[in-house]
Every structure is written in structure tokens, then in C-alpha cells.
Image (cartoon, grey):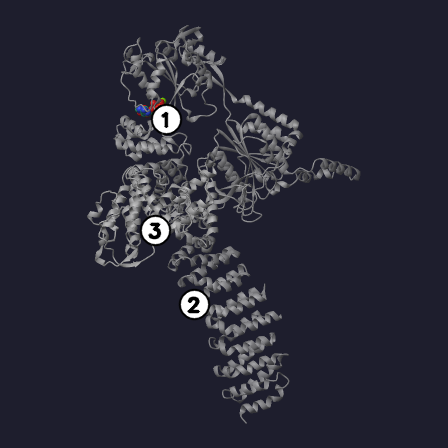
Amino acid sequence: MTTTEQASGFKQIQVEDFRITQEPYYLPIHDEVALFEAAYDQKVPVLLKGPTGSGKTRFVEYMSWKLHRHIGNVDEEGVPLITVACHEDLTASDLVGRYLLEGDDTRWIDGPITRAVKVGAICYLDEIVEARKDTTVLIHPLTDYRRLLPVEKRGELLEAAPGFLLVMSYNPGYQSALKDLKHSTRQRFVAIEFNYPPRDMEAEIIHMESGVDRAIAQDLAKLAEKVRNLKEHGLAEGVSTRLLVYAGKLMAKGISPRRACQTGVVWALTDDIEVQRSIEEVVTSIFDE
Amino acid sequence: MTIAEDLTARYAQELRGFGASLPDDFARGAEGVAGVLHEAQLEQWARAGIDLANHSLRSWEAAAEYFRASPGIARALEFDGLMHWVGLATALSARSSLIAAAFLKATPEALATLSPEQFEAWSQQGDRLCRGNWKSIALAALYFQASPGLFASLSLDSVGRLVDIVDQLTERSYELATTCLESAGPIFARLSPEDREPFLRFARAVTRASWADTRLYFERGPKLLEAIAPAQRPAFLDLAARVTLAVGRQGFPLFADAAAALASVEPADHVDLLAFAARLAPGSPQAAMEYLKSAPFVRTRLTPEQMRRWADAGVEILTTERNAEGAEAFFRLESTRAEEMMRALSARVELTSVNTMLRMYAKALSGEQVSVQSTEMLVDKNIGWMSEASATTEGTAIYLPPFVNTFEEQAANFQVYKVFTTHQAGRLEFGSFRYQWLQPGTQTPGSLLERETKRRAETATVEADGAKKRAEATTSMQRFFNLFADRTLIHGIFTVVEDTRVDAYVAREYGGIRRWLRRLQAYEAEHRPEVRTMGLREGLLENLLRISLGRPDTVRWPHALQAHLGRAIGALRVIEQDGATVQDSAEVSAAIYDIAVSIPNILADVPEGDWVMADEEMLSIAPSMPGGGGEGEPQMMPNGEEVAFENPPQPEFRGDFKPELVQLLMKLKLQQQGAQQDGVTAPLTKEQLMELLENSAEITINEWAEGDLASSLGMFLSNLEKEAGTPAGDPKQKGQQPQQDQPGGGGADEGELPMRIDYFFYDEWDFRAADYRPRWARVGERLSDEGDDDFYEETLRKYHGLVLETRRQFELMRPESFRKIKKLEDGHDIDLDDAIEFHVDKKAGVGPIARIYSRRNKVERDVAVAFLLDMSASTDEEIEKQRQKYDKDDNDDFDGDPRKYFQWLAQRRARQAIEPPKRIIDLEKESTVLVVEALEAIGDAYGIYGFSGYGRENVEYHVIKDLGEPFDDRVQRRIAKIEPIRSTRMGPAIRHTIHKLNEYDAKVKILILVSDGRPQDHGYGRDRTEKEYAVHDTKQALVEAKRDGITPFLITVDKEGHDYLKQMCDDIGYEVVDNIESLPRRLPTLYRHLAAE
Ligand SMILES: Nc1ncnc2c1ncn2[C@@H]1O[C@H](COP(=O)(O)OP(=O)(O)O)[C@@H](O)[C@H]1O
Ligand SMILES: [Mg+2]
């Protein structure tokens, strides 16, 4: 791995060199691991569908670590993972690359997708619906069997290196006419569905991730189940595993459960006072003072 | 001959010619006075009488009274006094002999309380009442006649004041004056001495303020006073007098209301209440009375100490804020501040204030779409639930008592609500209603099939004897209950067992609520009925209940039967195990049933010492299902009288448990949803249903007329079916929970759907009190009726050009929604300015990134607009006619040429023949069509609503097109149906529209009120003519809209309204339209303005 040790002491890594070297903790919920491995082997792009904080990112990290043995031309540390968080102003140049002025000359800089294509990395486009629709079209040629990336400004076509895989995540929760995934895009991916894990598994995750004991983790998972019952009745989204882990982490540091849930769950979830109070009552029913 | 006889003889001649009895009266009088007066005096005495008799035509009658009264008077007074007396009488007879006679006649009795020196003043009081006419003469005479009685309880001065009152009344009504004077004596006699003067003072005030109320006061006052603590009556009367001086006509009604209110407060509390009222009186007499009027209600919520603190807040308004109207509203409880303060102080928690929250809480816990409602509503449905005091559920809703006041702190009472809700939600969450026949439990072996076979064999022999055949069980629960001969008993046992299971789950799953569950359990355990007064079988259940409440220490049981109880407890413990299901509850109940039936329900004749409490052994009983029937037990039943079995009462938080009815309801629901059409489930037959209801222990038969059981059951059944047909009452809205009502739907048969009205309550702004009146107006939302098909199309045709113009204008607006974004690194265009600047910077060595591009970004329109149309009767006015009013000058412009005028008139008529005069409402309707066309072109979300109504209880809100509802021909027909109805209560209608916009998701929200600019309604102001209240409330509602991020805009279709509306819209968009032609020109500009982001 090429790292530059800076004088100030932080580590600077080239994106394409980013690899997951330690096994990330991931608790398989269903057959998603096997599905992903199969898709990777067959070079089939993957769409991870599910609410925020349900483990999509963690799953990709885990898979990138786990998949290292599938690949011959890169070292043993796993498949590089290049993540792009999508947003409204993300342009094609942002993904593919652009010319920069340097003195009186110009210099070409590869965008993340180009880098991923070149090194054969997993390219993870997080929250793809946030990106502008013309941007998403750009990736279409990458998803068919030729796996090509057109770099218009340079008049090139790049063929993806063997380890390359396009993965996107998509949260159907805030579906609206504006932010829906185009069918032409959607039809190019196999979709792995993510949902919040069942109570016991979620408790296990909370326990492992936050360090709180199993009983408290169980209560947090129970809370999650109850709060998720309120979805669409005052709550746009159920509480995510991520928030539960946060609450657990606060508790592990000695914050009282009720307080930790208030800051980590209730207030994070909604600004509606009435809904907040209702959830707080659920919290106080589950956790004693 | 005696002196008297001599005197009589001498005057005989002069006494002739008057009434026949006069000589006799003289003779008797002479005899009476002869012993007291000497000769010369006697002459004078006689002369005075004769003179009196001769005074006028009928004055001999007075003389007769003189002679009759004289003996007594002569004995009591000096001779001078006697003469003075007759002198007064003679003077009175100048007015009327009738008055003089009454005076003379009343004197002997009056002497008991009056001194001779007071005679003159007395006679003057009577004299004062006489005004010469016969009515006044009769009144004055009545006065003297009544005087002795009055003097018995009032001083001369006081009577003088009474005369003042009577005198004043005569100016209005002699009849009333007479009645009051007549009744005064007995009234004052009955009043205690200290109250008399104050009573009189208040009477005076009432008479001055509102003479007619004097009668009411004299009639009802004494009775009203009786309810006041005796020592406080003078203070109360004085307060009332003071108030009346200030408020006038309202004085007596306030007094009457306050007295009635005090009557329902403990007399011991009157001192404090009146003392506080007296404190308020100087600042606002009205507030003082309102305070008293509200006292009983406030007392139900607050302790005396809390009430003091509450009232102090009202005083603050009066003294610090110097807002008397505010204080009055506060004490009248028509103030949000007053309510909130009370809520904050009171320990009592109202369901209405926690309802929404508990609903969400219950949903979270149970994962079901439950609603939370008041038990009152369930009882009203008459589907088997009777108790309003305890919580319950029928499967789709959780019913809670309207308030909780169990503990002394508010927080604790809230926790009570939470425990209620948790337990009821627990019944849903942990499956109390999901019992399924023969489904295995996790803790118990299955025995029920065996039982059923046995039971069938038993009953078969009975049925063979001609008893009616049982229909198949309708539900699993029914099939289970069918296993037992005593359904009441098994229902009671199953209830205790299942509630025990649910409580055990709640305690395990919800560590946080456990403490409060225990506290409430303990509270309930301490309020149980005495076991020893029950039959033994009932006592067994009672003891199990106490065990299940976690209080084995409260168990009382005969020593001899300890083994029975022990086995029952063992079984109950089984159900407390983690994982136990409702199937286990059924098994455990069956086992306990066997134990219970082995114990007779007798009032056990057990000596004091043989009643045991739960001992160590009992406390440590392990969970275990009892073996087959407990044979080998020594049957040492105590003796005693057998009593009828009744299940022990349910603890409040557990409440009624009716699994059989709930399962039936669920089944009926499925059936109504058409689930039986799949052919798998056979539809329920009437017989099956009747059988279930007849046998169910969950319905109390004696609630119905006994002879008519079948028809009662039929009615009950139809209620149940109706209930099953209505979806779980769970409105999607949050915050405002509508109450549904089906007016006139009582006898509605299927086919015609009764109009559905959802009710919402809104505060109104009382500008005088500077406070909201809580839940003041009730807005009934309904779907508007549909009119004819043609109107919409016709209007389009009529305004063809306009419509096109408007559409075009609106379509022009669309490109504006593309926004240019500059300073981008990449984009469609290069921005020249930026590019030059960049190059300059670059040469200078700064600005490393070329942010020189620009791009047009499409900004999605995200606008929701609600049109609120005034449908009040005043919109029926013709616009032409009004214009005519303004155009009066033009009309004069015919230069006296009649031909011109007739020409003009003919033209006008012709115009009107083709086109009837346009009313405000027509303009509203036509504008609506234009607006719809325009908005459909641009694609913004819009709603159209109309409002009218009468009074604060009946604000009608008509939905013509809801936000988000697609536009179709039904909407067209509803527009056609817009018509003037009744009054204009704008504030609540605006508030409801705000509510609708708040529910709708859009970035830009607009409320456009189209009206004639005259908010007016019954009670929307102090009286019919007052507009200020209405204007202020409307203004406030518009301010609320702004506060919620909504842009309000007013369009007034009336020139007259201009100034009037303007005053309340200084900072709110406002436009007067008197001509539809101007609308399309105005609308786009206007709308563009409003919808700008
Ligand atoms: N199956 C899982 N195994 C381990 N951790 C998980 C799992 N699911 C969720 N998490 C936890 O939840 C957090 C949020 O997950 P993340 O992958 O960031 O969600 P997403 O990408 O779906 O928004 C993770 O950091 C991790 O702590
Ligand atoms: Mg993520």
C-alpha cells in the first residue's frame, strides 16, 4: 500500500489503494454474503436496497475484505474499495475526471470511478438516487458485459480491470416521484434487500459494536422493534441499527440508558414533540431509571 | 248612664248618615277611652272622630277605624300623642280615607315595635307612595297594612329603604310594586337578622339596574341564599350589590348563578371563596362573580391550595396586566391560560391531553393500528362493554377512562394511564385474543379435546331429552367456553389467568414500567373486597387475583382448604413462566376450574383463627399443573349457607376482558370484508350468533328488558355488526383527532350512505382577554354535495377567452422555475464575468479553481395552495345592485330627460334577461373555475374548500376538492353546488385550512381566502352588531397561518368590505375584486408573487 506519512502525523492514502486490512465485524442476516460472492464472480453489478443504517456500507466493507481470495492480480489484503457519496451536484466530471489548469498547461485527473475501473476495485456509489439523473446514465455502459467506461473529454474508452464491480445503495424509504431510481438504471443490477435485523440478531450487533452487555443490547433491540411499529405514523423512518449502536456506545461510557436513548434515538429520529414524547414513553417503559 | 253612654247619646245625631255600624263603633270606642280620658279630652276625642268622618265621602270608614283603635292607643299614649295620631290620620285622609283607615287600623299592632315619636315618619313613608291615582292609593294602604309585619323584622329606616324600592318600582309597574311589598314581610321575617339589611341593599341595587329582576330576586333570592354558609350570606349579598352597581343588568343573573354554584361547594369553603371574590371585586366585579361560578368545577380538579395558586394567576392578569376582560375570561374558564394553569396544577390527568401520545405509544408496543378512545364511547356503542371506570380493549381500540385521579401527583396519575395502556396493549401484543382451538401451549399438556368428548357425551343425554340442539361454536374462544357447565365461572377464571400472564409479560419485557405496575397492583390489592363476605368459590378466585397482583400477603383462606388453594396457585404460577401462551392460559384455566367446582360457593362458617394468611409455604409454591382432579384429598368442606356465584370485580387497570366477543367481532369483520366468499369459511348464521350471545358470560343479560330477550339480542347483534363494519377508528392525522358523527343516520338503511362528518375543535382568539378560548369552535368537515354537470363547462365556454389568457399566463410562469446556478466548476455555459475574474486572479496567483461555469437547474415546483370560499348568506347579494349604489351619480346623469332614462332602464333589463344579476357567490364560483384551469396548467397541488355554519358548535366545512385529490367531473359538479348557506365564522374555517395545509407536504404553502369580507356569526362577538371580536379572531387565525409557514392571502369580492377588511390585513396580502374580468389579469401576478420561493 502506498501511504505518505505526512509531517503532521496523519496518513494520506490514494483512494485506489484503500483496502480493508482487518476483518470488519459483520453479522450475516440472510444469504446476502453468498449472493454477493456469486455476483462478484459473475461480474454482475449489485444494488443494495434498504433503509439507512441497516448495514449496507458495513456489508460492502466486509465483502471487500472477504473477497481478497477471489482475485489473483492484487495482493492478499482484499479488493480495494472506492466509495462515492452521491449528492445533488455530483456531475459526470466529478465521477470520471477532469482537466485542471496547471501553470499555463492543463493536467488530467482521474475521477473515482475511473480509478476503480483501472485498478479493479469495488466502486460503491452510496445513496445513488441523490445523484442527478444524467450522472447515473454515465454508468450504464459499465454495467453490461463489456464493462466499458467512456471518458468523453479524452475520447477514450476504458475497459474495467478484472476485479472491478459496481455496487450502489438505494434507500426506498424516501421514495418520491423526484427521487426514484430510473428503471433503465435499476434493471441493470441485481438487488440485495436489506432490512433491519430481527430482534435477537440486532441485539447481538449492538452488543458487539457498542460493547454494552447483552441484556441492555436486547432492550435496545426491543426498543427498535417498538419504534419501528410507528413507521408511517409520525415517523418517516424507523430507528436504524446505527443509532442503536450509538446509544449503546453512550451507555457503555456510563450514560444512563434513558438519557442515552433520548439523545441517541428519540431526538435523532424526529423533531415532532408529540412523537418524541410517545417514543420517550416507550423508552421509559423498557428502561428503568 | 255612663259617661260613655252619655257621650254616644250626645253625638248620635252627628253619627247618623254614615255607615250603619259607625254609632256602634263610636259607642265601643267611647267606652274604651272613657276610663282613660277626662271629660274635656273625651269631647276632643269625639270631635276629632266626627271631623274625620265628615272629611270626605268615605272618610267615615277611617273614623270607624279610629274609634275601634282608640281604646288601645289611648291607654298606650298620652292624650297629646293620641291627638297627634289622629291628626296624622286626618292628614292622610286628605289623600285618601282608605289610606287613613289602613294607617289607623295598623297602629295598635305597629305600637309593639314603633314608638309614638316614629309615627310621623311612618305615616310619611305611606304618604310618599300615594300619588293620587287609585293604584297608588291601594299601594299606600297596603303599605300600612303590611307595616306591622315589616316592623317585626326591620327598623323604621330599613322599611324606609324598602319603600324607596317599592316607590321606584311603581314607576314601572304597580303590580310588581304590590307583589314585592306584599311578599316583603314574610321574606324578611324568614331571613336571619344579619342578612336583612344586606338583602335590602342588594334589592335596591337590582331595582336600579334592572327593575324587572326585582320580582325574581324577591321570589328566588331567599331560597338561593339558603345554600350559602349562614355566616357568609351578608358578605355575599354585599358583593352582589357591589357587582350589580358596576355591571347593571347582569347583576342578578350573576348573583343567581354564583349562588347556585356555591350551593355545590362545601359550605365550609365559602369563607375563602367569598373572601377571594371580594379581593377581585374592586378591580373587576364581574371577575369576582365568574370566579364563584367556576369554583365548583375548579374544585373537582384542584385542591384548595392549588386553587388559590390558580386564582392568583387570574389576579395577576387583573392587577399586573390591568386587563379586566382577560381576568374575566380567565375566571369564566374561557381562557387557554386558565385551562393550562389548571392542567399544570391539577394532579388529575385528562385523557384528552394524553390521548394522541398514548395512541402512538400503544401502536409502538402492540404493532397494531390501535386507536385510543374514552371508555364512554365504548359504552355508548352498546356492544357488551358496560364499565366507564376501567380500561379495556375490543381488539382494535384501547379504551381508557376519561380521567385518572388515583394518586396525588400528576406524574403518578400519568403513569397510571401508562400502566392501563401497557396492559391493554399487552393483551394485543401477547395475543390474548388469538386463542386457537387445540393449538398446543408451551407449558402445559393438552387436555381439551378429551374434555370436549366427555362434555359432549354428558350433554348428549340432555339433548336427547328434547333440549334444543347446540349450534357449532362460532369462534375458538366459544368452543373453549362450551367445555364448561358454568360459563360465568370459567370466564372469571380465564380472565384472572390471562391477565396474570399478560402482567407477567409486561413485567418481564418492560423493566421501566414494572415499578408502576407493581405500585398499581399494590394499590388495587389494598382496595379489594373482604374475602370472608364472599362465597368460598368466589373467595378462591379473589385470592388467586391477589396472588396475581403480586400481593400473596393479602390472601385470606380457610385453613382446612389450604391444599385446594395451593394447587390453584401452582397452576397460576405456570402461566407466569416466560413463553407461556394464551393456549396455556386455557389449559391452566381448565385445571383451576376443576378445583373451583370442587368447592361449594358457601359463606363459610369458619372460626376467626382458622382463616390463614399466605404462609411461607404458599409463597414458595412452584409452578405445577395439578394432577387428575385431586382425588385422595380429605373432603373436609366447612359448613355454611350457599350463595349465588359472582366473579370478583376486576382491577381497574386490567378492566373488562371479553375474548369471546372480541373473537366474534373479528370474525364478523372478516365476514364483512368478504373473506367468507373464498368458500373456506362458511358465513355465520343468525342462529349461531344468537346462540353465542345468549350463552356468553361476557354479556350481562339483566341489562335488557327481560321479557324481550330475543329482540334485545337482535338489537345487540346489529350493533355488533355495525361495529364490525366500521374500520378501526384511526384517523391518519396527528394532533387533531376528528370525532365522527353521522347526523340523521340513526335509521339509515343500507344503500344510502349517511353523510360523514368529521369534527375538529379549535380555539378562538378573544382579543379583549388577550387569550384563546379553548376548544371554542367545532368545525364539521364533510364532502360537498354535487350539483349539475353543466355549470363548469358553461363557465368555460362563457369565459373562453379569459380561460385561454389565464392558462397562457400561468404557463409562462413555468420557465421561471428554472434557476440559474453560477460559480460552478463545470456547467452548460461559461459566465463571462466569472471567467475574466478567474483569469485576473490566476495571473495574480490566487483562485486556483476555475469556477466559471453556470447552469440552469430545474427547480421542482413544490407548492400547495388552499382556496377557502366564503359560502355565507351574505354572498347571495348581487354585485350589480351594489355597484348601482356606487353608481348613483351616474343614474342622476340623465339630464332630466326621461327618454334617456327609460332607454337606460330597458338596456339594463335586456342585459339582465340574458344574464341574471351576478351575485358575489357567482363571482366566487366562476373565479374558482378559472383558478382550477390555471392551476391544472401549472401542476401545483391545490384544494378548494367552502365554509359556512351557524354558531360556534356548527362551523360547516365543505370539501370541494381536497389537496392531493385529483381533479375530475365530481369536483366540477361540487363547484357547481357552491351556494350561500348561513353565517361566516372565518377564524375556525381558516384554522382548519391551516390544519389541512400542515398535513400536506410541500415547500411553499398558500392559503387564499375568498370572501365578501364580513366575518359574522351568531356569538362571534359580544352581540349581533359587534364585529371586533370576529375581525380580531380572523386576523389571529391568519397570523397563525403565517406562524406555520403558510402565506395567507385575502381576496375580497366586495367594495364595501374594503376598509373593513383592510384594518385587519395591514400586513397580509389583500386584494379587492369586483369584476371577474380583472381576475385573470390579477391572478398570475398575484400567484407568482405568492408562490415565489
Ligand atoms: N449486519 C450487521 N453486522 C454488523 N454491524 C451492523 C450490521 N448491520 C448494521 N450494523 C451496524 O450499523 C451501523 C450502520 O450501518 P451502515 O452499514 O453504515 O448502514 P447503511 O450503509 O445501510 O446506511 C454499522 O456501523 C454497524 O455498526
Ligand atoms: Mg451508509
Under circle 3, the secondary element is: loop
Amino acid type, residue under disc 1 in the picture: Asn
Under circle 2, the secondary element is: loop
Do the residues at discs 1 and 2 belong to one chain?
no
Q: Quadrant of ligand 2?
A: top left
Judged by depth in the image, the label closer to the viewer, 1 or 2, is 1
Amino acid type, residue under disc 2 in the picture: Ser
Q: Which chain is mark 1 on? A: A
Q: Is residue B676 above or below residue B471?
A: above
Amino acid type, residue under disc 3 in the picture: Pro
Q: Which residue is mark 3?
A: B649
- Could you tell whether A166 is left or right of B444 in the image? right
Q: Residue furthest bottom?
A: B1
Q: Nearer the viewer, residue B600 or A228?
A: B600
Judged by depth in the image, the label closer to the viewer, 1 or 3, is 3
Q: Position of residue A170 (x, y in %)?
A: 40, 22
As drawn, the label of residue A195 is 1
Q: Which residue is mark 2?
A: B192
* Residue at mark 1 to residue at mark 3: CA–CA distance: 46 Å
Under circle 1, the secondary element is: loop
Q: Nearer the viewer, residue B152 or A175?
A: A175
Report if the beta carbon of the residue with label 2 is closer than 8 angstroms to ligand 1: no
